[in-house]
Amino acid sequence: MNSAVTINLEILGADAVAKATRDIMSALTDRRALMAQVAVDSQQFLRKSLISDSRHATAMRLGAAPSGHRAKSAAGVEADSDNDSAFLRIPRNTGLGRAFHDMNIAPRSGKKYLTIPACAATYGKSARDFPQGVLKIGSYQGRFPALVYAADGKPAFWLVKRVRQKQDRSLLPSDAEFGKVASRSATVFIDNLIAKGGAA
Amino acid sequence: MPVDSSSIFDAARSAGARKVMETTLGTAGLREKGAGILARAVFCARGSNAIFVSDLKTIIDRLAQGDIGEGQARTAIWESLKALGYTPEGGFPDAPPGAVPPAVAGTLQDLSSFRRRDLIVRTQLQLMRGAGEQTRGHTPERLRTHPGWEFIRIEDRDAPRNWEGKAPTRQDPIARWIIAGGEVSEGSKMYALKGDPIWGELGSYDNFDDALGVDFPPFAFNSGMGWSELSASECETLGIAGPAGETPDEWFQSGPVVMAGKLPLPTPQISLKGVDPALIEAFKQATGAKERAGKPLTMDYSDILEESIARRAEIYQKANPDYDPEYGKKP
């Protein structure tokens, strides 16, 4: 099972470029530091982007306080690198994989239904977060299966057999934006080398 | 988008290295255990049942790997407690009588309450993320490119702890950053070099009642705090120095030690001395990225690099007739 989504930013083709280019490449044979710089800058860019994204559609629809899901997702973004690549790892449970593909969500661990919050009080929670006896299985208008409040029969969670979410590339910055960050990062790296190494 | 099947969330790696530890102690009692033991353990105050603590470790591992979300983790904890016969009043059925005082249902002392399960899940996840962030940030190349940490708020809190001195309370009157040995800079920013003892002091039981005994975020229960890496140039601009005024290079050469062990030496500085300035400029300009055909989200710089350098070499050659782009100076 894959555990993370990886954005792969690579500098390739050192062997294919002209000798003149290799002069520079030879000074940058060990590119781990360059890639580390790109990785951290990209991570900080993505984290800021997620935190500043003010979309809280479900919370707004239910009249609930936002759960801070985006900020939590930002905290989970990891930056890593090696000699050839800079990586961003985004945990699957952030749901950000939907930026790249449709998501089909089905119940697991032998369960038959997914529980979808139906009101502000259940937003960001699961049915097990409520004490025993507070909720019971019922239906809304006799048609839609739901976990309802035992006290008044109002729906707390919709019970659905599966959920399909369409791909939404806007959940993450565009490829071009990541490219710009990587470009700026590499430029700053070279500038720093020049400043420290006195090459220019 | 390539999905890296071999990559394992560092937080999960950190979790994998930890052992389970059942205990009848409260958090204060746990502090009397060695910090080294706790740093390597998944522990849970009042978690007196070995099977429960083992389940908890499994659940947290799955959470850290991204297999389940926080809600599913809370549910899994609830199911484990139910299967083991836990009640807030009586604790676990097999616990020695009187080992765990009865808890009021719904309170933080009740392992099955939402508040407690939520605290367990969030604290354990944040600890593993913090440990992972520290591990990645302490590689030789990251010490070179990003020698410092800035201590920042990553989640809002209604009643924040008095980290930088802005939220004094009777229990927390002095800025924790100051108590830990730091200086709050202009704009209430808090930063220090990686491996600075201030990070250990910030998470020390001896300094703060709610500390977690670690030298990485979240430092304290439910703190909402985290780290952001500071680049070498930012450290220089901000004048960040080691505990005795050392430069970052001097500090790392001195062999600082963190709870996880001694920091490695940063990667050596690469020199561009002697490299043609025009070529360096070309390289700087050439690092624009574009998507590789057939491999979405893999950025390839080499085509742009080659085109740009060829163009600049041509310009340079016109200005310097003795220069040959293939061999440098003409023989």
Image: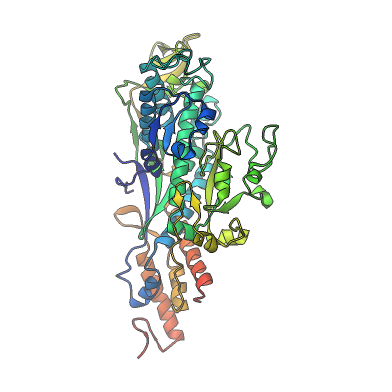
- Which residue is at the front of the view, B50 or B160? B50
Q: Looking at the picture, does residue B10 appear above or below residue B121? A: below
Residue A165 visible in the snapshot: no
The quarter of the displayed image where residue B170 is located: top right
The quarter of the displayed image where residue B299 is located: bottom left
Residue B22 relative to residue B104: left or right? left
Residue A47 relative to residue B69: left or right? right
The residue lying at 67 percent from left, 35 percent from top is B172
The x, y position of residue B243, in whole percent, is 60, 55
Residue A13 relative to residue B26: left or right? left
Residue B32 visible in the snapshot: yes
The residue lying at 35 percent from left, 74 percent from top is A22
Query: Is the image coloured rainbow, by chain, by secondary structure, or in one colour?
Result: rainbow
Mark count: 0
The residue lying at 50 percent from left, 57 percent from top is B146
The extreme bottom residue here reads B331
The x, y position of residue B210, in whole percent, is 57, 33
The N terminus of chain A lies in quadrant: top left
The x, y position of residue B276, in whole percent, is 44, 79
